[in-house]
Structures are given as structure tokens and as C-alpha cells.
């Protein structure tokens, strides 16, 4: 069979697209086994304390109530979970507000909600003061410490040369602080699961980014062999990191199903998400950049302070991208973390890179200002030959090409570089640039591929499509390896009945799954070629496992890069900032499907726009909770916020990645986007804002410093 | 359709209603607390309308009620006896065989990723097109222009403004606007 137009690098349409536009695609809470009950969790109403009693009598008296599980009577786990956030209903203390303290199960959704509302929880300190809690992050917090590692396994502290001395001696210096507030993932589909336990087998439809990890956790908690647990995640309504690890909803749904003997559906209420599904921790940044008068960097310091919860240590690795970006003989990159009485932070789209590059790329813009240099030229000048911190060669690095191509497409060089120089009536107009980077990871994966006698193929791998178009791109990879038409390939993903695969996370899904699919299909093509006579009725199946191959990859620095440009208008009357256009150019290896790739990159840039302008959460000091916990108060970008957003890429041929030559594209679109917007706001107004988001309450007073704020 | 729990008999807390869903009358016994969204999803197994927030904040549950777009999570099913409801499952023609041009445009433009907001975007866009055709102004409509004579022309700014009740966390907005433009051309 000849290779067809629908193989690698072509804009194949999403295989499940029709199901998604007709409403046929079913998500985790849209499976209703016969007799299905509904569960509704009860969050703690205190920030920390001890539960002394849970009165379930009123709840159980509600019509349709089947059970109320509490820390005192819920089934005990066979083994404690690795993630302390999953240790639900196992003990009587409350580590943070929103922690689940009971679970109501009833025959209908309405009855479950009413039963949950009728649960009465008493705490040791309920009568008078809540136990003193501490949820406020600041640089000088007495409990701040430097951990050994930050998220991703990176060393928390790295120093090369003498960054402080080199900075002190540098002719041109920037010493600035930036702040990024807590942020929430808020995928449109709330975390949901439908669990069914029958005949010693547990089947769970879960809204997750990877079913294998969910299966492992459920098997261990409920003492079941893994082959008796099936986790299905056929369609997932977004995750952005918050579904990357198993979450309490799936544990509670399974617990309720096992306890009641009925299938149980549990969809988290939107307002619960910030407390139990992770968040991007706030980060406080101090950056010190020292340069020669020609712009050559001599010292780069990025110091990050962030928070974690009392029950888990998660350290947003925001200083790590400074180890990758620019050459400098002296460098300090370090993290400090403060354990507070807050919900556990976790992954949110490009953890580390997103807040870290916001701060670093804003500071680089400040340095360009101080030098009187074009910010594109400054970045080009400091582009390193090898990865600065490790000294490793890059498998490929085309940041300079992205910057140049972006500048050309955006019309960067037409602008008047002076700040606050362009005015249209009450509007100030400005443009900004920032760089982006994200590591190109891959994890071991298994897949199998079958050639059928009718000339079609079935490819099986437990990949998860959280909106990336995984099915489609994997079918393309398979078709290319088999030199078969795309239509001849059936792709099966989204179930632990399929060969084991890593999660959709770290922008590594396609690289990991595709690698295994490619190996299976290449071997299958050879097996078919070597097969005499017609294929057996059951077809010919080949299995691949990339574990050894992935572990043996040579030690190159593998990263995607990009350049983000933004044009903003700032209303001097209202303080409102609007993004007129955004343009990104990325170097992310081979783009396997330009249609779905463009959507992911644009979507990432829009999340960065939200981070810059609208998204903001607050840890309320008195209450000990996020105040912006729903979609009315936590403002994700809406249609009207998003005008022209364009994503482009440069051709990148990198033979040191994986058989497809691809780098991940799910996260890099978000990286640098907020810095580009912030730098554009500076160019528009001449004012440097160093705390996100750029809402009118911050912007307007700075534009009119002479006016006293009305109290 | 998937099997659903048989509805409880009517009592002080339940009532019988008939909804015309996608052209077919459906008799239901509904709990008085049941929203239209839950009646569709749990009662009728029509899971096309999505629950993103259950509080009227996201638009994922948008359906057409008597031809007008509405957040199904904010309507009580018991109050809708006799109403015409169109969900995403009823948008395609010929019993679902032939996609509506807007659905086709969403496919052509890749106007979604995870697809969870998509049914709401589709229903909202259909309602929005009808509103503009009927001359309803929006914030983006020039107030100084002469009083609307028939349809309001749908510029990209009009589309964005009118679709702003439908959040998409995947950020498919630019492609959604293009898809809507495709069907008004
Ligand atoms: S679910 Fe109805 S508006 Fe969000
Ligand atoms: S496509 Fe995922 S929320 Fe819109």
C-alpha cells in the first residue's frame, strides 16, 4: 500500500470530532449502569482542627439516602496512599479547608445533595475559636526552607560561579521582584467518576489524564489485584494537570460503590475543585540580572519562594527555566517553600515554566530597557551554545529562529521602542515579546498492533485524549509506520484493558505513546512482510515496550522553545487592559498534525492571556480558603477577551528525540505568554507592573498616581 | 440511550411533566428540585448538554428552550411542562445523519479540543444567530447606528460578545468564531 496523504504532518481531522459535535461522546459521569446511585461529598468547614463527631441521622433520614460515610466508619484502606490528599475519610483531623469529612450516597442526585447538606459535623474547636491557622505566604516566613528537590525531580538549589559577586560587579543591573498569585486549572469538565463493583471486579469511568495510575491506586487502597480493576477514560473534558494524578473523587466513588454494592456516580461540584484537585501555588520571585554594557549577561539569579500544604511537599520549580534559557558564567537558581494550612498545590499547565518564565522574561525586558537595547536582540545575543546549567548539548534549539520569524510576522521592528509613545484617544498601545521553553520528555510505554486479514489494523495503547487529539495523531503515527491509509487504522485508547501507558502530562503523551505505537507498527509491518500466505483469522499481533529504549536515551538537553509577541491597549480612563493580538512562533520538533497542534498552541496562549489579565485567586487569611473558587469569581478568559491569536512554528529536524522527531506542544503555548502581555503593557504605559493579573484596580492607580484612591 | 433508574411515582415532591425534546414528547416524573440539565442527563440519558458549574457560570449546559438559548442548569424541569427543548443531540438533520452546517464548521475549523464546552457552544451559537437575525442588539452593537432594521450584522466582535457566556478552558475561541462566521457567510 502506498503512503497516503493522511499520515504524519498532515492536518487530519479529529477521529472523535463527530461524536463531540453531536453530543455522542460520553464523559466519566455520563455512564449510568442500572441501579446507579449518586454520591455527594461534604467538605470541611474549618481550616484545621479535629472532628469530634459526625451526626448522620438527619442525612440518613432524607428520602433515598443509602449511606453516609464518615472518618469514623468509612471502610479502611488496605495501604496508605502515596498521595496524602487521597487518604480521605481515614482519620479525624482536617489538614485544610475543603478536605472531605463525609460522603453522602443516595438514589438520586437531588437526594444525595440534600443528604450531604444534612450532615452535621462537629469539630474540637467548633464552639469557640477555630484552631489558629496560617495560610499567608511571604518571603520572610519563619518556616521557609530550601527543599532538596523541586517538582519534576530537579535539584531545588543550584549555583554556578559566584552569582552575587558577579552581579555586584556588573555594569548594568536589574534587581526586581515579581509575584504570581495562586491559579486554578478549572477544566470545563469537573472531576467525575462512575464506579461499579460486581463479582470482585471494580470498573471505574474516570475523568483523568491517565488510567494506569488510577488503577494502581485503587487496587492498592481496596486490596484488589490490578487485573480486577478497570479504569476507563474515553473522553476527558480537559485536565491541564489537575487530572494528572488520581484525585479524591475517584477514590470516594469506588469506596461508595464497594460499600453500598451499587454503582455510584460522583461529579465534584465546581466550587470544590480548588481545594481538592490541586492548584498552581503562588510564587514570589526575586531576579537579579547583571550584564555588560553590550548586553552580555554575566550573572543570572532567580530565587523563588512558594507554598505547599502541611501534608505534602510540592515545590513549583519556577527557577528551573533560568537554568536553560540564557548563557551566563555565574548563576544562582533556588527555591524556598513554606508549608501552610492550605490545600496541596500540584500541576497546572507547565508547572515551573509558566510562572518562572513570566518572571524571568519580564526581568529580561527590564534589562533590555536598562541597556537601551531591543529585547529581541538581547535574547539573541545571550542564546547559549549548550545548556547553561548542565553544559549538555541541546538536541536542537531554535529560539533565535522563533524570535526572528515572530518579529517578522508580528511587525515587531516597525514599532517605536519608546514606552507610552502610541496613543489612540484614551487608549495607550504597546507591544511586547517574551521567550518560551518547555522540556521534551518521554516515558516508557507499551502498545500492540494487529494486522487483520481484511487489510485493516487495530492499534491499542492506554493513551488518554484530554482534548489534545491523541487518537488522531496516534492513528497517523501508526498509518505512517504501516504505510497504510489512515482509514485502515482503528485506534483503541482510554482503558486499562489496553497496554500500559503513561499519563497525558508533561507534554509527553504523544512522544511516549507514539514511540510505542511506532515501534509496534514498524515491527508489525515487518512481520506482515515476512508472513507467507494469507493472515490467520485472528490477524497478526505485535507488541512493543519502549522501557529499555527510553531509558537508554543519550544525555542531551531536550527542550522546545518559542517566542511570544503581544499587542495591548490600555484604557487610561478605566484601567482596562485588552490584548489586541498575540502571535507565537514555536520550535517543537516535527509537528505531527498541524490542525490539532495549532489548536493546542493557541489554547495554551489563551491560558497565558488569562494569567496575565484575569486569573487570580486569593488565600483568605482569616477564612483559610480560596475566595475565588467558582467560575463567576475566578475569571478564565471568555470569548470577548480573545481577539486575534496566531500560532506558527519553524521547521525543526531533531533526530535525538523519538522516532517521530516530535516535542510536546501541550504546555509551551502558555509559557511566556503572560510576560509578553506584561511587557506590552509596560511599552504601552511606561509603568512596570510586577504582580499579576493586570486588572484595572492595579493598572488605573498607577496610570494616575496623582489621584488618591477613594476609600 | 442507556438504561436509567425508573422514575419514582408522583407525590408531594414530584410532578409529571412532558417536555418536547428534540421534537419528541417525553413524559417524566420529576423531583421538584431537578433542573432541566439533570432531567436531560440523568432522567433521559441525553448527556450532550454538559454540566460545567451547575450555577449558570459557564454555559456548558446551554440548550434551546422554545427556540431561545438558556442555561439548563438554571431551569427547574417542573416549570417547563409543554416546552420545546433542543439539545445538541437534536441539532443534526435526518435523525442525526446529516450534520448541521454549524457542526460541520466546528469540525472544519477544529473549533474544540476536549469537546466538553462544545454542545453548549453549538446551541448557544444557534440561539445567538436567531437573536441577531431578529435584531437584538448587544454591547458590541453601535448604539449610534440607526435603529436596527431587521438583522444585526455579525462582526467578529459581535460574535465574541454574544458568545461570552460560553467558556472554553481549552481556548478554542478563535476557531469557534471562525466556525460561526462560516455559517453566516
Ligand atoms: S453548567 Fe450551566 S452554566 Fe455551567
Ligand atoms: S473544547 Fe475543552 S473546554 Fe472548550
Image (cartoon, rainbow, N blue to C red):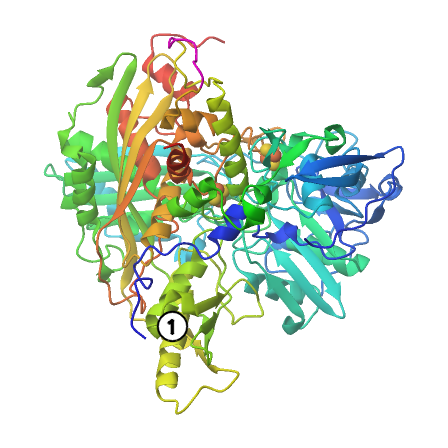
Q: Nearer the viewer, residue B172 or A558?
A: B172
List the single residue furthest toward the left.
A294
List the single residue furthest toward the front.
B94
Q: At which x and y percent is residue A429?
A: 26, 22
Q: Nearer the viewer, residue A348 or B80?
A: B80
Examine the rendered structure and indicate whether residue A623 appears above or below residue A332. above
Query: Which quadrant would the N terminus of chain A be assigned to in this image?
Result: bottom left
Please, what secondary structure does the residue beneath circle 1 have?
A: helix
Check the residue under mark 1 and report the chain it is in.
A
Quadrant in which ligand 1 is drawn: top right
Examine the rendered structure and indicate whether residue B110 appears above or below residue A684. below
Within the magenta stretch, is there residue A472? no
Q: Is residue A654 left or right of residue A371?
A: right
Residue visible at 46% across and 17% down in the picture: B137
Characterize the local packing of mark 1: few (<14), some (14-19) or many (20 or more) Cα atoms within 10 angstroms. Answer: few
Instruction: Give the magenta-colored segment's residue range.
Output: B144-150
Q: Which residue is mark 1?
A: A551
Q: Is residue A37 left or right of residue A520?
A: right
SS assignment for the magenta stretch, majority:
loop
Q: At which x and y percent is residue A599?
A: 37, 46
**Which corner quadrant of the image does residue A367 belong to?**
top left
Q: Nearer the viewer, residue A178 or A215?
A: A215
Tell me, yes or no, if residue B153 can be seen here. yes
Q: At which x and y percent is residue A58?
A: 87, 39
Residue visible at 32% across and 67% down in the picture: A658
Amino acid at each position: 500500500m502506498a503512503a497516503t496523504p493522511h499520515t504524519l504532518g498532515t492536518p487530519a481531522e479529529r477521529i472523535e470530532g463527530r461524536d463531540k459535535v453531536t453530543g455522542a461522546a460520553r464523559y466519566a459521569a455520563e455512564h449510568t449502569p442500572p441501579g446507579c446511585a449518586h454520591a455527594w461529598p461534604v467538605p470541611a468547614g474549618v481550616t484545621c482542627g479535629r472532628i469530634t463527631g459526625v451526626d448522620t441521622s438527619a442525612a440518613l433520614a432524607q428520602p433515598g439516602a443509602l449511606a453516609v460515610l464518615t472518618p469514623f466508619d468509612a471502610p479502611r484502606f488496605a495501604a496508605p496512599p502515596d498521595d496524602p490528599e487521597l487518604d480521605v475519610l481515614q482519620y479525624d483531623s482536617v489538614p485544610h479547608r475543603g478536605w472531605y469529612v463525609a460522603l453522602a450516597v443516595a438514589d438520586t442526585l437531588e437526594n444525595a445533595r440534600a443528604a450531604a447538606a444534612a450532615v452535621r459535623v462537629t469539630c474540637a474547636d467548633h464552639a469557640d475559636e477555630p484552631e489558629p491557622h496560617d495560610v499567608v505566604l511571604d518571603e520572610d516566613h519563619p518556616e521557609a526552607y530550601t527543599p532538596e528537590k523541586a517538582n519534576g525531580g530537579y535539584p531545588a538549589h543550584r549555583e554556578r560561579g559566584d552569582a552575587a559577586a558577579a552581579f555586584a560587579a556588573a555594569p548594568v543591573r536589574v534587581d526586581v521582584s515579581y509575584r504570581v498569585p495562586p491559579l486554578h486549572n478549572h477544566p470545563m469538565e469537573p472531576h467525575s467518576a462512575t464506579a461499579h463493583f460486581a463479582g470482585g471486579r471494580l470498573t471505574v469511568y474516570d475523568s483523568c489524564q491517565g488510567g494506569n495510575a488510577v488503577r494502581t491506586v485503587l487496587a492498592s487502597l481496596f486490596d484488589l489485584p490490578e487485573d480486577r480493576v478497570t479504569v476507563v477514560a474515553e473522553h476527558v473534558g480537559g485536565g491541564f494537570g489537575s487530572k494528572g494524578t488520581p484525585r479524591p473523587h475517584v477514590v470516594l466513588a469506588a469506596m461508595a460503590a464497594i460499600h453500598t454494592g451499587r454503582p455510584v456516580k460522583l461529579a465534584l461540584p465546581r466550587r470544590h475543585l480548588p481545594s481538592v484537585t490541586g492548584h498552581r501555588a503562588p510564587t514570589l520571585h526575586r531576579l537579579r540580572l547583571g550584564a555588560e554594557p553590550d548586553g552580555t549577561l554575566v550573572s543570572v539569579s532567580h530565587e523563588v519562594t512558594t507554598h505547599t500544604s502541611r501534608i505534602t511537599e510540592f515545590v513549583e520549580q519556577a527557577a528551573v527555566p533560568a537554568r536553560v534559557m540564557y548563557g551566563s558564567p555565574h548563576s544562582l537558581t533556588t527555591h524556598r517553600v513554606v508549608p501552610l494550612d492550605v490545600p496541596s498545590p500540584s500541576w497546572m499547565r507547565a508547572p515551573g515554566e509558566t510562572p518562572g518564565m513570566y518572571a524571568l522574561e519580564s526581568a529580561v525586558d527590564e534589562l533590555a530597557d536598562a541597556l537601551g537595547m531591543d529585547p529581541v536582540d538581547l535574547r539573541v545575543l545571550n542564546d547559549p551554545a549548550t545548556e547553561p546549567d548542565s553544559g549538555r548539548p541541546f538536541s536542537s534549539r531554535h529560539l533565535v529562529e522563533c524570535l526572528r520569524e515572530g518579529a517578522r510576522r508580528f511587525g515587531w521592528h516597525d514599532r517605536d521602542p519608546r514606552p507610552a509613545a502610541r496613543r489612540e484617544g484614551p487608549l495607550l498601545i504597546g507591544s511586547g515579546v517574551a521567550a518560551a521553553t518547555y522540556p521534551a520528555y518521554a516515558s516508557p510505554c507499551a502498545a500492540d498492533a494487529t494486522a487483520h486479514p481484511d487489510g485493516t489494523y487495530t492499534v491499542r495503547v492506554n493513551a488518554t485524549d484530554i482534548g489534545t487529539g491523541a487518537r488522531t495523531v496516534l492513528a497517523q503515527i501508526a498509518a505512517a509506520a504501516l504505510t497504510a491509509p489512515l482509514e485502515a487504522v482503528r485506534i483503541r485508547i482510554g482503558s486499562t484493558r489496553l497496554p500500559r501507558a503513561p499519563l497525558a502530562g508533561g507534554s509527553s503523551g504523544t512522544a511516549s505513546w507514539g514511540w510505542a505505537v511506532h515501534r509496534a507498527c514498524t515491527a508489525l509491518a515487518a512481520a506482515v512482510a515476512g508472513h507467507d500466505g494469507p493472515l490467520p483469522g485472528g490477524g497478526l499481533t505485535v507488541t512493543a515496550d519502549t522501557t529499555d529504549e527510553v531509558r537508554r536515551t543519550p544525555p542531551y538537553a531536550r527542550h522546545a522553545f518559542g517566542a511570544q509577541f503581544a499587542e495591548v491597549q490600555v484604557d487610561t480612563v478605566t484601567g482596562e487592559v485588552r490584548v489586541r493580538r498575540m502571535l507565537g512562533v514555536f520550535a517543537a520538533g516535527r509537528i505531527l498534525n498541524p490542525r490539532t497542534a495549532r489548536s493546542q498552541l493557541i489554547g495554551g496562549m489563551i491560558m497565558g492571556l488569562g494569567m496575565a489579565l484575569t486569573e487570580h485567586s486569593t488565600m483568605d487569611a482569616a477564612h483559610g480558603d480560596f475566595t475565588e473558587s467558582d467560575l463567576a469569581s475566578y475569571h478564565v478568559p471568555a470569548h470577548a477577551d480573545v481577539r486575534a491569536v496566531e500560532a506558527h512554528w519553524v521547521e525543526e529536524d531533531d533526530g535525538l528525540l523519538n522516532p517521530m522527531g516530535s516535542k510536546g506542544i501541550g504546555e509551551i503555548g502558555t509559557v511566556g505568554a503572560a510576560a509578553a502581555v506584561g511587557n506590552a503593557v509596560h511599552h504601552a504605559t511606561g509603568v512596570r507592573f510586577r504582580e499579576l493579573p493586570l486588572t484595572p484596580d492595579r493598572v488605573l492607580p498607577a496610570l494616575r498616581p496623582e489621584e488618591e484612591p477613594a476609600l | 440511550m442507556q438504561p436509567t433508574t425508573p422514575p419514582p411515582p408522583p407525590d408531594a415532591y414530584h410532578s409529571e411533566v412532558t417536555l418536547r425534546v428534540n421534537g419528541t414528547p417525553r413524559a417524566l416524573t420529576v423531583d421538584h428540585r431537578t433542573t432541566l440539565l439533570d432531567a436531560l442527563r440523568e432522567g433521559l440519558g441525553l448527556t450532550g448538554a454538559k454540566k460545567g458549574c451547575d450555577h449558570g457560570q459557564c454555559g456548558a449546559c446551554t440548550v434551546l428552550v422554545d427556540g431561545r438559548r438558556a442555561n439548563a442548569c438554571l431551569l427547574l424541569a417542573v416549570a417547563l411542562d409543554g416546552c420545546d427543548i433542543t439539545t445538541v443531540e437534536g441539532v443534526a438533520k435526518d435523525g442525526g445523519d446529516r450534520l448541521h452546517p454549524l457542526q460541520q464548521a466546528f469540525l472544519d475549523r477544529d473549533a474544540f479540543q476536549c469537546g466538553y464546552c462544545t454542545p453548549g457552544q453549538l446551541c448557544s451559537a444557534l440561539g445567538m444567530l436567531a437573536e441577531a437575525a431578529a435584531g437584538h442588539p448587544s454591547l458590541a452593537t453601535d448604539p449610534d447606528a440607526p435603529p436596527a432594521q431587521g438583522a444585526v450584522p455579525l462582526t467578529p466582535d459581535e460574535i465574541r460578545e454574544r458568545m461570552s457566556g460560553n467558556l472554553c478552558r481549552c481556548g478554542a475561541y478563535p476557531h469557534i468564531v471562525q466556525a460561526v462566521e462560516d455559517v453566516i457567510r
